[in-house]
Image (spheres, rainbow, N blue to C red):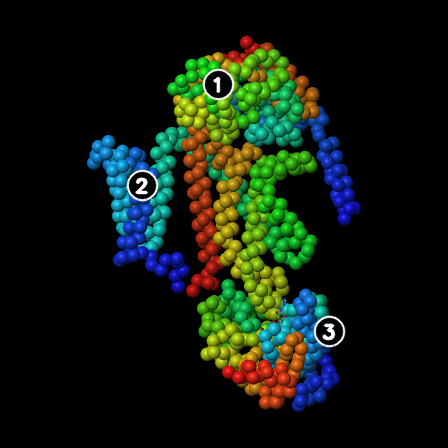
Amino acid sequence: MRSIIKKTLICAGLMAAAISTSSQAGKTLDAVLEDKMLVVGTNSDYRPNAFLGDRNELEGFDIDVSREVAKRLGVDVKFVTPGWEVMTAGRWQGRWHMVVGSMTPTTKRAEVLDFPATYYFIPAGVAVHKNSSAKSIADLNGKVFGVVSTSTYHRYLEHNLKIDAVGTPPFEYQIKPQEIRLYGDINEFDDLSLGEGVRLDAVIQSVSVINQAVSKGLPVKMLGDPVFYEPLAIAIDKGDAEFGEKVHAIIEDMKSDGTLVGLSRKWHGVDYVTVK
Amino acid sequence: MTTMKVEHRDRPPGAAEAQQIAIQLVGVNKWFDDYHVLKDIDLSVYQGERIVICGPSGSGKSTLIRCINRLEEHQRGSIFVEGTELTSGLDNIHKVRSEVGMCFQHFNLFPHLTILENCTLAPMSVRSLSKQDAEQMAMRYLEKVKIPDQANKYPAQLSGGQQQRVAIARSLCMEPRIMLFDEPTSALDPEMIKEVLDTMVELADEGMTMLCVTHEMGFARRVADRVIFMDEGQIIEENAPAEFFDNPQNSRTRLFLSQVLGH
Amino acid sequence: MKTSIFTTSFQRGKPRLKAALVFGAIAFVIAFAAAVNTGIVGELLRPAMSEAVLVGLWGRFAVALVVGILCFGGCYGLLGLPHRVQSWSVWAGLALSALLLFYSFDLSYEFIERKLPFLLTQGAFTTIYVSAISIVLAFTFAMLGATAKLSGIAILEGVGAFYTSYFRGVPLLVQLFLIYLGLPQIGLVIDPVPAAIAALSLVYGAYMTEIFRSGIQSIPRGQWEAADALGLQRMVTFKKVILPQAMRVIVPPTGNQFISMLKDSSLVSVVGVWDIMFIARTQGRADFKILEMLITASIIYWLLSVVLEMVQHRIEAHYSKSVAR
Ligand SMILES: Nc1ncnc2c1ncn2[C@@H]1O[C@H](COP(=O)(O)OP(=O)(O)OP(=O)(O)O)[C@@H](O)[C@H]1O
Ligand SMILES: [Mg+2]
């Protein structure tokens, strides 16, 4: 009996060793150039960055940025939508080469992913019901907030937001919520639309999503100024510095020749690329 | 087929010395876990012989005849059927089963098949008869048991007596040389018992070797060459029916007969 | 013989009146308890009553009474119809009310209309083919699993026992993630759709193994013995004697599993398979119209499962023809 257990353990150990050594070092760029295809992981429900448009194809800011990066690499582009948890978990095994999904390079995520290039900054704002009694953000202390689970807005409300991308503007925690409700599949704006305090008093989201909600006719409005600016970066799997440098160089080019600003104006209506 | 000639001390009275043996059990023992069901059974059945086995409930009658076509496995001793010894070898088992037909107390017809399909399944699959030949033969035996007109019905649409006759016909379609019956009439209403017994009598008259567990003493008297009485896994007494019923030797036999015949 | 719980079907005479009264009384009690006088039903009685009376206790009683009487009348009328017409019209009536309830949500039909084609051509198409392949595979796994478990060969029995224990014991979602994220760790990178199909068919195959096994074991020993006595090979016995009978026991719960699988296939949207649920969620969330999409999705799923239900009835009828006298 003993010896069986021992053998099993040895087998398991060998398998684990085999697995850990099989990580790909510097292969992504080769794969992209060889197949002439850049596979980009992104979102499918995130207006105006990546969403299914009326032609039932993905469109938006992230999509256009990806296309431009692929063009400058001299390859075609293909999109996949593996889901947020899967993308942020890392270890993509070459299923896709990069994520252009408006991802914030938090310290936690940097443990499993590399963030070679920050491509824009987005302000996070507070949205309330349009009949809300709150006059300023300070009035919302001790209220119920809704945010997307594990998002930077969630971390912000927990006073636990750590971003270490270069050039991130400093911010301070202005709100002490009474309760944080977390959202995933259901849209927090649907609950906010039910009325002030019915389920939620306020929502924290990116200003561009708030603007989208307002323009789609939801009974919500933005309150006060943005509470913080978060950098959004292209993510790649750990281990291919060469690919990272290449992506970094392309994004820097797109910044300096004005392409990125143009795309931001097209999709967000304003310039979110240049740091204020 | 090799048939064997066996010297046997317990040869039934009147049987010729040279008669051929169809079934022979030598020192057969069987256990269900540690329960000893069959104890040192010795029995020879001659070709064309008709044997009735009786005895109290739980005495091992069913187990005994189920050992003969290997529905149960014996642990000690040997069983020969038409010269083939029953061992764990699959070939032997198949050979024996193709020689031996069996009818059960609860008929065990296949309820999802019509009467005709019940009868043709085994001939087509085991003996590789064509569908046409199998159906022709099935109709012949269904006529023999007097229910050819029910051929396309399902078993549930027939009476108990009719179902048991179908079961007999189904066995006959494999053209066995030996038929085993395990209380074929004890699940039937009295008015149906006769039709089944009549069929069995007819079979007996044609010379079929038969082993029949039954408590129908009238049938035993009329048809059996030999009656065997079992109790607690042993053969207690065996004799020609007239002797057996009129002059039982063992006290346990007398007690049993008084209970069966007494009411 | 009719095997139903009540001896009469309450279609005429006194039983009919009584049954209608019971239904009416139940409707009255529910209407009273739910205070429907303050809702849409109350609005209908507005012409007969003043606002003040309507909201009071008397108004509540009166409105509930009207509801009760309406229900009594409706039921009395319905009960007079032939059995089949009756059950079908009630089915249709309830379906209509469900749709009316959705209709009252104030949804954007223009949005649904715009998104529906894609929901069908991409979403429903994916759901159907993922489910169809999974159903076939699950059936195969279940057949193999049950055969292994009943084979009498200890090694196979061990394999079967582990299979059902593991795949029934771990949630489908976890299984899906393990296959999608775990297999690549040993160098087997598979796409979302095959991962989804693998998870669905393995898990449902495990459930169905148990259904098959118990169905096969529900066939009395006597059937095996009769076949043995006739000299049939065990595999022939299994195929021609045991399985056809077991199917009668197996089909209804298997149909259930398939309907359940069809719906559980919505879980695959988490690994980015563009099925009904994925499209509905994506479109709904991006345009802040999640309710529209969810209701549309629910109706599509429902219609699909109705089709499966009908198929199940067909198969059930086929395997029970020998017991129908
Ligand atoms: N599969 C089995 N496992 C364990 N015990 C069994 C099994 N089959 C039979 N027995 C036991 O063996 C004994 C003999 O059974 P058997 O069926 O041969 O008796 P029987 O003489 O045919 O009785 P009956 O007249 O009731 O049919 C009984 O005590 C019974 O309980
Ligand atoms: Mg018995």
- Residue B255 in sight from this viewpoint: yes
Query: In the image, is B135 to the left or to the right of A194?
Result: right
Q: Give the residue at the far top of this rendering.
A: A276
Q: Which amino acid, by three-letter code, is at mark 3? A: Gly
Ligand number 2: quarter of image: bottom right
Query: In the image, is C287 to the left or to the right of B239?
Result: left
Quadrant location of residue B238? bottom right
Q: Are marks 3 and 2 on the same chain?
A: no
Residue shown at 34% from the left, 48% from the top: C90
Q: Are marks 3 and 1 on the same chain?
A: no
Q: Mark 3 and mark 2 in contact? Answer it, CB < 8 Å.
A: no
User: Label 3, label 1: how many angstroms apart (C-alpha)?
Assistant: 92 Å
| Vertical side of A217 occupied by A17: above or below | below
Q: Secondary structure at mark 1?
A: loop
Q: Chain of mark 3?
A: B
Give the image location of residue A251, x and y in percent: 61, 16
- Residue designated by label 3: B77
> Which numbered tag is attached to residue C31?
2
